[in-house]
Image (cartoon, helix red, strand yellow):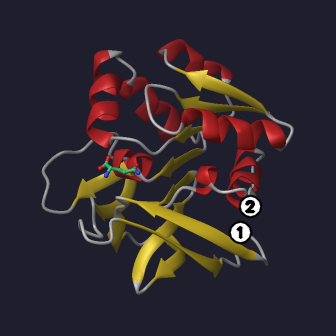
Amino acid sequence: MKIGILGFQGAVIEHQRHIEQLGQEAVVVRYTEQLAEIDGIILPGGESTTMGKLLNRTGMMEPFREKIQQGMPVWGTCAGMILLAKELDQDPVVHLGMMDITVRRNAYGTQIDSFDTQVVIPEVSDEQIPLVFIRAPYIVRTGERVKVLCEVERHVVAAREKNMLATSFHPELTGNAAFHQYFIGMCSGK
Ligand code: GLN
């Protein structure tokens, strides 16, 4: 399987390592044409405003939307979740706008803007998964077709809508590959 990782900036290499360790090919995506050769794509954590601008500047935004519409699996981690959201809370900006969620940026404020915890997410694995949050967003509204996968302190931090997966946290910054395995499953049609 060829798994793309949007390669403008952010935690690209970390995702690449996990994908390769699971025996799949990782492709760093920077050009529109590359969208044709991948089975799914990860939008990494980083800075959503910058990534959104680069998606527009490279002309990738619209073809990207079409691919997602056609069913290409996509997983947004942190800033990637912000890129996927149909709506941001108290913010008129919309990037890809494909997933029926409303997302609050920097939702944990400045005091505790980075923290980690461990949870069991039955849809993903029977074992505990470490979650790392860095200036993380969370989901404040989920549409009817969105399945909540995980809540931490009553805030939705992982969700799936058909071919779209969004996580507030960064599985690529931990040694645990459960989410990458789950996404590879999505790319093989699960
Ligand atoms: N706060 C960042 C943003 O709004 C996301 C942080 C991250 O991806 N770790 O883009």
Pick the front one: 133 or 103: 133
Q: In this view, does 29 lie above or below 145?
A: above
In this view, the mark in front (1 or 2): 2
* Residue at the far bottom in the pictured view: 154
Q: Where is residue 7 in the image (x, y as percent from the top left)?
A: 51, 26
Q: Residues within 10 Å of mark 2 (few under 14, many from 20)?
A: some
Percent position (x, y) of residue 94? 24, 45
Q: Write down the quadrant of residue 141 in the picture.
A: bottom left
The residue that disc 1 covers is 124
Q: In this view, does 115 lie above or below 94?
A: below
Q: Which of marks 1 and 2 is nearer the N terminus?
A: 1
Question: For residue 173, which numbered disc appears in the image?
Answer: none
Q: At label 2, which amino acid type do we have?
A: Ala
- How far is disc 1 from disc 2 in space, using C-alphas? 7 Å
Frontmost residue, 82 versus 113? 113
Residue occupying the point 57% across, 68% down: 131
Q: Which of 184 and 47 is in front in this view?
A: 47
Give the structural element (helix, strand or loop) at label 1: loop
Q: Where is residue 74 in the image (x, y as percent from the top left)?
A: 56, 44
**In this figure, which residue is indicated by the disc labeled 2?**
178
Rate crowding at label 1 as few (under 14), some (14 to 19) or many (20 or more) other CA atoms within 10 Å.
some
Residue depicted at 18% across the width and 45% down the height: 93
Q: Do the residues labelled 1 and 2 touch (CB within 8 Å)?
A: yes
Residue shown at 45%/63% (left/top)? 133
Count of numbered circles in the view: 2
Q: Residue furthest front?
A: 111
Mark 1 C-beta to ligand 1 under 8 Å? no
Question: What amino acid is labelled 1 in the image?
Answer: Val
